[in-house]
């Protein structure tokens, strides 16, 4: 990385080296807390992306032929380097994303869960063996790596999502090309150095920084076998359709509009505390953030909104450098403007703004991209504020009369990433988990993000394709199963030609 006038010029990571961009195109990386440009990120051309894929392709056969235990050993060293360099990683993540220190630490810890699972690759790629399936014939199924596989990641988890998308891909024997988010590229470059220090052979881990040009080359290049995408729903749909057109295996995770249903028997103080963290943590820039509170019954809604008004007013929006900050800025000025406009729109659609995040001093005066917490009550289906994902601290209250109404509304929504219910009624909880059409479901937990060894993905417009991020499904997604039938003949084994379809 070079430095000019205090603004770093970043690179790609190709063939085990930091490589300068040659396209002549650069994007700006901001420190969202100060609003300043801190780095220029090269945006790869089609040609640069192709060359990076070629290097990965050339490195693949040797890594494929390295024993799975040796690959796992590199991942163990990588894991140790992640924990040893936790403070440096936190600093980078906070600087380029604006997250609080504890939030960044949590993200790294959850990302390490994916590395832990990947270290278990020897177990997860074990095959199946059947003896004597025909005359002297044994059969086995074995998992083989795919070759060059790609990950395209979003800005909001600079390390957790890339680790979740790529760790297993590496240990099962693929060469990985990561197209990191151009808004948070410094974390991915730092992670590249750690892979190198861990002993990963050159070419097995590549970071191509860029935008649509790099992504389109990844989607079209015949050497890329699979694409794992995480980002917004319209882009996820595009990636899935285009990747499929070019014959690739694709999993594309999209956005969320996640609900918290509150039954009248729930402890509302506990619900309010859970809602506040799950709804506004990380300035609501989480695909699993709770967007909509759905209290069942007028009394539940009135009491809950009263409690929330007080708690939301006490939230501290500020810099990650201040210890008592609850959440920091959003990622960009453009994002800030879109989020503030969403409050205006919600109000004009008839929602009641009970907490107004537009009015905080820090929102009006700071050069950082701060947005205060808003809560809109009496939001209704059909309003844009209800239908669209708002990736910032504007949250809704939708009042429903019954659990059936809540389930119906949630199932009718285009997105189906996460959902949770708060209740002490086992029957209601069971009905909810059975009937709800959402990928990740919680009961009395604020955000139902599965641990790294369970599969993670939404339903409907929150996921295109069949794979998962996190979990054992990663080992399936990044391998292909070959089934071998074999017979070893002795000189006494007699064979004759048969023309009928073989049967046993
Ligand atoms: P985004 O869709 O704008 O960008 C994601 C990636 O796609 C980036 O690497 C970007 O460079 C690339 N990209 C953007 N536009 C493109 C285009 N037109 N053609 C090709 N590539 C393009 O998403 P974001 O703003 O970085 O991240 C926030 C979104 O990601 C939210 O919608 C959030 O819900 C979602 N998200 C989902 C999950 C999940 O697990 N479902 C997890 C994290 C974030």
Image (spheres, rainbow, N blue to C red):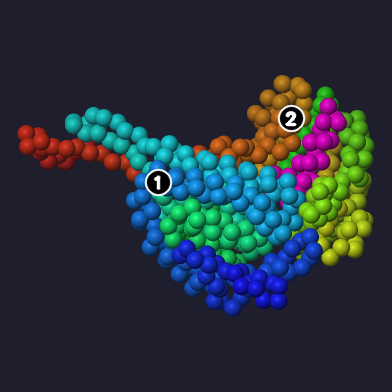
Identify the image quadrant of the C terminus. top left
For residue 96: magenta?
no
Give the magenta part as a residue range. 267-289
Q: Secondary structure at mark 1?
A: helix
Res 193 visible: yes
Q: Which mark is residue 22?
A: none
Which quadrant of the structure image shows residue 435? top right
At horizontal 74% and vertical 63% (from top left) the residue drawn is 31
Residue 333 x/y as whole percent: 79, 64
For residue 284: magenta?
yes
At horizontal 35% and vertical 41% (from top left) the residue drawn is 142
Q: Residue furthest front?
A: 84
In this rendering, position of residue 201 left or right of residue 102: left
At horizontal 71% and vertical 30% (from top left) the residue drawn is 443
Q: Main secondary structure of the magenta part?
A: helix
Ligand 1 in which quarter: bottom right
Residue to which mark 1 is pinned? 70
Image mark count: 2
In this rendering, position of residue 108 left or right of residue 219: right
Residue to which mark 2 is pinned? 444
At horizontal 44% and vertical 44% (from top left) the residue drawn is 72
Question: In this picture, is 373 found above or below 449?
Answer: below
Question: In this picture, is 234 found above or below 422?
Answer: below
Instruction: Please state which of residues 298 and 188 is positioned toward the viewer in this rendering.
Output: 188
């Amino acid at each position: 990385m070079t430095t000019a006038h205090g603004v770093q010029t970043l690179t790609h990571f190709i063939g085990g080296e930091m490589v300068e961009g040659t396209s002549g195109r650069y994007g700006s990386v901001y420190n969202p807390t100060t609003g300043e440009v801190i780095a220029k990120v090269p945006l790869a051309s089609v040609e640069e992306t192709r060359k990076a894929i070629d290097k990965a392709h050339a490195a693949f056969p040797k890594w494929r032929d390295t024993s799975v235990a040796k690959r796992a050993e590199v991942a163990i060293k990588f894991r140790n380097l992640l924990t040893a360099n936790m403070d440096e990683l936190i600093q980078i993540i906070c600087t380029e994303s604006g997250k609080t220190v504890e939030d960044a630490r949590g993200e790294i810890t959850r990302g390490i869960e994916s590395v832990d699972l990947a270290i278990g690759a020897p177990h997860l790629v074990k095959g199946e063996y059947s003896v004597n399936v025909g005359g002297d014939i044994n059969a086995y199924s074995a998992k083989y790596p795919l070759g060059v596989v790609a990950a395209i990641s979003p800005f909001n988890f600079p390390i957790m999502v890339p680790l979740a998308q790529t760790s297993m891909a590496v240990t099962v024997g693929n060469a990985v090309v990561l197209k990191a988010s151009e808004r948070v590229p410094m974390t991915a470059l730092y992670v590249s150095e750690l892979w190198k220090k861990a002993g990963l052979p050159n070419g097995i881990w590549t970071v191509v920084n860029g935008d649509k040009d790099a992504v389109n080359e990844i989607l079209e290049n015949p050497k890329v076998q699979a694409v794992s995408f995480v980002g917004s729903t319209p882009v996820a749909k595009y990636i899935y359709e285009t990747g499929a057109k070019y014959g690739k295996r694709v999993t594309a995770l999209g956005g969320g509009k996640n609900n918290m249903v509150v039954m009248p028997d729930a402890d509302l103080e506990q619900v309010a505390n859970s809602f506040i963290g799950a709804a506004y943590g990380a300035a609501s820039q989480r695909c699993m953030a709770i967007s909509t509170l759905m209290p069942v019954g007028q009394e539940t809604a009135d009491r809950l909104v009263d409690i929330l008004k007080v708690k939301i007013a006490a939230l501290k929006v500020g810099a990650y450098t201040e210890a008592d900050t609850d959440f920091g800025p959003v990622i960009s000025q453009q994002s800030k403007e879109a989020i503030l406009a969403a409050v205006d729109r919600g109000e004009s659609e008839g929602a009641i703004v009970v907490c107004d995040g537009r009015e905080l001093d820090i929102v009006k005066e700071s050069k950082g991209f701060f947005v205060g917490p808003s809560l809109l009550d009496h939001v209704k289906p059909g309003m844009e504020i209800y239908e669209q994902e708002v990736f910032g601290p504007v949250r809704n209250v939708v009042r429903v009369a019954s659990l059936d109404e809540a389930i119906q509304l949630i199932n009718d929504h285009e997105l189906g990433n996460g959902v949770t219910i708060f209740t002490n009624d086992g029957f209601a909880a069971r009905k909810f988990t059975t009937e709800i059409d959402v990928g990740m479901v919680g009961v009395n937990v604020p955000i139902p993000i599965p641990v790294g060894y369970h599969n993670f993905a939404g339903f409907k417009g929150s996921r295109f394709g069949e794979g998962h991020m996190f979990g054992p499904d990663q080992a399936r997604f990044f391998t292909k199963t070959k089934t071998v039938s074999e017979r070893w003949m002795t000189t006494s084994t007699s064979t004759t030609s048969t023309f009928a379809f073989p049967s046993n």
